[in-house]
Amino acid sequence: MWQQLYQTHKDSEIEILSVAMDAQGPAKALPYVEKAGATFTTVVDGDNFLGQLLNARAIPNGVLIDEQGVVRHINLGGFDVHHAETKQLVEDWFTQPSGAVDAAAVTNETPLDERALKLFERGLTLYRDGNMSEATAEWRKAIEFDPKNWIIRKQLWAVEHPDKFYVGDVDYSWQREQIDKGL
Amino acid sequence: MVATEQIGVESVMPEFELPSITDGRAVRLSEYRGKKVILFMWASW
């Protein structure tokens, strides 16, 4: 869907910058990019830099940035281009002057828990050094401080249960079971 | 990279540099200046 929108509008002065929030690095997200045949750029934000900047606890997120680098719209958690509303917003953004877009921003006013972010960071260092079980232990502590930080929680799940994420489609019913069990 | 501020609508989006998923090239937001940009955040999980 993104590729289709990009293809339609790429001759205008527009760009899509896709950001994979994958702490595991490019390998896990790259198949999605290849499958989509995406010709716009995708980068990897394994440190959750943009999550912290935008105060985001979940994905998918969209930020519309105008020609001068000013943020014109933010949608945290609901920026799904398969939804008619988001698709329309993208079309409008690509075809109308940047000042014309007046969709209501969806932001998060509850600050992220600093302790959780520190623990997530510490876990990242351990993960990259190959200390998997110590890394996941730090991330689990992080979730205790910020239970609704799905960026941390789902990253933990993906590392601990790769079969639920990388064998066929992502298993959302398994995720719901974990939530129901309070995990 | 550690975020030191939080941004909202009407903020100037801070410069950042992240590696391309295909070849690791450092991509900067400022490369897109002068264009209307959609920053789209997703993940494999």
Image (tube, coloured by chain):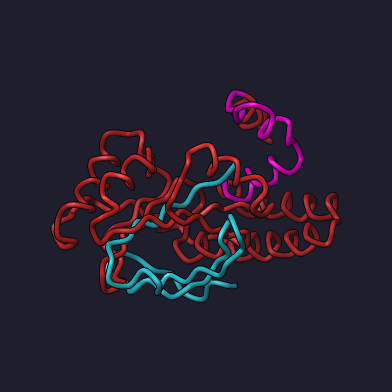
Chain colours: A red, B cyan
Residue A23 figure quarter: bottom right
User: What secondary structure is the magenta-colored segment mainly?
Assistant: helix
Q: Position of residue B14 (x, y in %)?
A: 42, 74
Image position of B27 with respect to A155: above or below: below
| Residue appearing at x 18%, y 55% in the figure | A101
Is residue A101 located in the magenta-colored stretch of the structure? no
| Residue appearing at x 68%, y 55% in the figure | A142
Residue A67 figure quarter: bottom left
In front: B37, or B43? B37
Q: Which residues are magenta?
A: A150-173
Q: Position of residue A175 (x, y in %)?
A: 62, 30
In front: A13, or A158? A13
Q: Position of residue A71 (x, y in %)?
A: 30, 66
| Residue appearing at x 35%, y 56% in the figure | B38
Position of residue A122 in the picture relative to residue A108 (left or right): right
| Residue appearing at x 17%, y 52% in the figure | A95
Screen quadrant of the N terminus of chain A? top left
Position of residue B26 in the picture relative to residue B32 (left or right): right
Position of residue A116 in the picture relative to residue A80 (left or right): right
